[in-house]
């Protein structure tokens, strides 16, 4: 990996792809403020998968089906657990994950096909899981919006996870789904410290904009929860009370959290990012993360990988539990309805046609 961080990106270079014998890379990187340097440009590649709905079988996750309209994510969060998924496509989990975005323009058609299958039983689908459905490219591609329109056609229950206020563009279809009990939205809120946000999540909406998204979605009667994900010791851990208070005041119905973990190539990206941006506390952060995950930065052990274990994890758990009860009580998200699901007749126009 390069020693010099790339301005406006989370990763500082290209860790080796574990699936490739050979690799290519760029030794010298310039700052993102050099528009003529094509090495900094994001590439968007059209991918035409054969299926779009994925089965999820993890005891740590509250959903069993997911859908990703994009692969790779321009948000550039150095800690992102999904970075290694880019290696399956032949790319690096480093800068490639942020700069080579696979766009699945046929996702709405594939979703419609999946919902028409006679064995489909209206299991809720989470639109996210590997990348953010409202990352910057969605402004032009509008794939996520088209997926919402398909969900409306079929009255299919869905949930969304995002850290981008672009979700407000779709407040109309989200409101329609919410009126039927068919949608939940989770907003990832990691910090209200803007310098930290710019370093940690360089191409995302500010914390203030995410709180605005919570307020406006709730005003439209859309169920919203806040995810403090991930909690990073010695970086944003101390903000837990502030984040819970601010999100409750914005109208969020409840909140949850996960602790950071750095599996596979994410370990290299995350460690290099810490040393580049927070050299004064990098060793402390990595020590505490390892202490929560059995001595390693990465963790695949069910249960432990999301919440950690040991004294540092217990302290986070206690603080979160006390503050969550203070600001949210015992509130939970309303369940998604499955009984309204229907298959429109072939050729029937949707609500937005």
Image (spheres, rainbow, N blue to C red):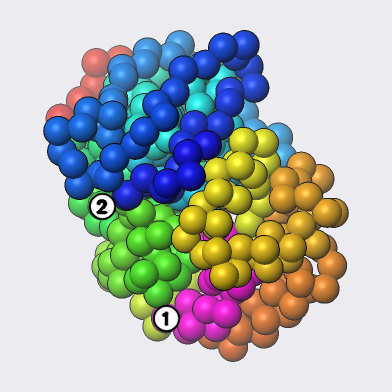
Q: Residues within 10 Å of mark 2 (few under 14, many from 20)?
A: many
**Place of residue 286 in the rendered image (x, y in percent of width and height, measured from the top left):** 68, 59
Q: Is residue 147 depicted above or below 256 in this figure?
A: above
Q: Residue at x 62, y 11 (%)?
A: 21
Q: Per the image, is 330 magenta?
A: no
> What's the mark number on residue 166?
2
User: Between 51 and 94, which is closer to the camera in this rendering?
Assistant: 94
Counting labels gives 2
Q: Is residue 332 visible?
A: no
Q: Which residues are magenta?
A: 225-246
Q: Residue at x 42, y 81 (%)?
A: 246
Residue that label 1 marks: 246
> Does label 2 or label 1 sit earlier along the sequence?
2
Q: Residue at x 31, y 19 (%)?
A: 45
Q: In the structure shown, which secondary structural element does the residue marked by tag 1 occupy?
A: helix
| Apparent side of residue 118 relative to residue 330 in the rendered image (left or right) | left
Q: Per the image, is 243 magenta?
A: yes
> What's the mark number on residue 219?
none
Q: Which quadrant does the C terminus fall into?
A: top left
Q: Residues within 10 Å of mark 1 (few under 14, many from 20)?
A: some
User: Between 168 and 47, which is closer to the camera in this rendering?
Assistant: 47
**Place of residue 81 in the rendered image (x, y in percent of width and height, measured from the top left):** 58, 43
Q: Is residue 267 visible?
A: yes
User: Between 5 and 329, which is closer to the camera in this rendering?
Assistant: 5
**Place of residue 12 in the rendered image (x, y in percent of width and height, measured from the top left):** 45, 43
Q: Marks 2 and 1, how far apart in space?
A: 20 Å
Q: Is residue 70 depicted above or below 161 in this figure?
A: above
Q: Residue at x 25, y 32 (%)?
A: 41
């Amino acid at each position: 990996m390069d020693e010099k961080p790339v301005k406006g990106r989370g990763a500082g270079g290209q860790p080796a792809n574990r699936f490739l014998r050979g690799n290519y890379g760029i030794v010298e990187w310039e700052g993102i403020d050099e528009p003529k340097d094509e090495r900094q440009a994001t590439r968007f590649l059209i991918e035409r998968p054969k299926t779009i709905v994925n089965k999820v079988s993890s005891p740590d996750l509250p959903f069993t089906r997911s859908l990703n309209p994009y692969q790779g994510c321009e948000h550039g969060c150095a800690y992102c657990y999904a970075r290694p998924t880019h290696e399956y496509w032949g790319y690096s989990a480093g800068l490639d994950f942020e700069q080579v975005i696979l766009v699945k323009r046929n996702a709405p058609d594939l979703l419609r096909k999946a919902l028409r299958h006679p064995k489909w039983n209206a299991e809720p689908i989470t639109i996210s899981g590997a990348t953010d459905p409202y990352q910057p490219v969605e402004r032009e591609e509008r794939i996520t919006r088209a997926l919402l329109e398909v969900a409306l056609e079929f009255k299919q229950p869905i949930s969304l996870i995002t850290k981008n206020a672009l979700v407000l563009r779709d407040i109309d279809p989200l409101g329609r789904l919410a009126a039927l009990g068919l949608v939940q939205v989770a907003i990832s809120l990691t910090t209200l410290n803007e310098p930290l946000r710019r370093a940690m999540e360089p191409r995302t909406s500010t914390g203030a904009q995410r709180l605005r998204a919570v307020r406006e979605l709730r005003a439209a009667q859309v169920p919203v929860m806040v995810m403090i994900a991930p909690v990073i010791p010695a970086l944003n851990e101390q903000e837990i009370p502030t984040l819970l208070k601010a999100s409750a005041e914005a109208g969020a119905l409840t909140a949850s959290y996960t602790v950071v973990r750095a599996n596979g190539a994410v370990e290299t990206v995350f460690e290099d990012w810490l040393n580049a941006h927070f050299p004064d506390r990098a060793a402390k952060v990595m020590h505490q993360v390892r202490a929560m995950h059995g001595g390693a930065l990465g963790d695949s052990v069910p249960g432990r990988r999301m919440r950690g274990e040991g004294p540092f994890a217990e302290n986070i758990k206690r603080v979160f539990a006390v503050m969550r009860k203070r600001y949210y009580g015992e509130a939970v998200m309303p369940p998604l309805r499955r009984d309204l699901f229907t298959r429109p007749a072939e050729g029937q126009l949707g609500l937005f046609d």
